[in-house]
Amino acid sequence: MAYWLFKSEPDVFSWDDLVAKGETGEEWDGVRNYQARNNMRAMKTGDRGLLYHSNIGKEAVGIVEVVAEAHPDSTAGDPKWECVDIKAVRKLPRAVSLDEAKAEPRLKDMVLVNNSRLSVQPVAEDEWAVIMELSGAE
DNA sequence: GCCAACGTTGGC
DNA sequence: GCCAACGTTGGC
């Protein structure tokens, strides 16, 4: 299983919005960046991800799961843009902020720390474990 | 609200 | 195919 990070501005689409979508989840549409799209193409159903709030909060707030693999983005009008569907799994016991990630030596290579502009990022397995530890999620 | 970093576009 | 100009993102 692979791990990912999905970034969203919470005043546009927040963790609570995703929770409200329930078990069927939500299409992660609107991505118009090749690297981010390629990451989504690589996702498999059942992969886990973090939902990160940019701008407001700047913290990872919850765990999501891929429920549908890449398909054309219904909002794009061009089949080259694809996206996956994700659903909320559970909120982190404690959000992990960008500052904390930067301060944690084991996360120094994390994409979030080094290339904060990429909106859909891979997360290494050991990085995932560190985030879980910091958040208090077992 | 500013600005640095990055990605994309378009002229040549 | 290069590269300058431009637009967008996101941290500060």
Image (spheres, coloured by chain):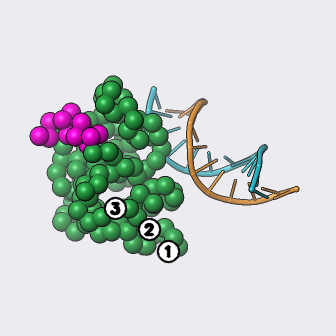
Chain colours: A green, B orange, C cyan
Q: Three-letter amino acid code at disc 2?
A: Glu
Q: Which of marks 3 and 2 is in front?
A: 3
Q: Can residue A36 be seen in this view?
A: yes
Measured as percent of width and height from the top left, residue A26 is found at 30, 65
Residue at position x 38%, y 38% in the image: A110
Residue, far left? A138
Whole-angstrom CA distance, mark 1 to mark 3, is: 18 Å
> Where A65 falls versus A73 (above or below)?
above
Q: Three-letter amino acid code at disc 3?
A: Met
The image quarter in which residue B2 lies: top right
Q: Is A46 inside the magenta-drawn segment?
A: no
- Of the residues under marks 1 and 3, which one precedes in the sequence? 3
**Residue A43, labelled with which disc?**
3
Q: Do the residues labelled 3 and 2 touch (CB within 8 Å)?
A: no
**Residue A79, labelled with which disc?**
1
* Labels 1 and 3 within one chain: yes
Measured as percent of width and height from the top left, residue A12 is found at 38, 52
The image quarter in which residue A74 lies: bottom left
> Where A59 falls versus A13 (above or below)?
above
Q: Three-letter amino acid code at disc 1?
A: Pro
Residues shaded magenta: A126-138
Q: Do the residues labelled 2 and 1 touch (CB within 8 Å)?
A: yes
Whole-angstrom CA distance, mark 2 to mark 1, is: 7 Å
**What chain letter is assigned to the residue under label 2?**
A
Work out whether residue A36 or residue A88 is closer to the camera in this orientation and state it: A36
Which quadrant: the N terminus of chain A? bottom left
**Residue A82, labelled with which disc?**
2
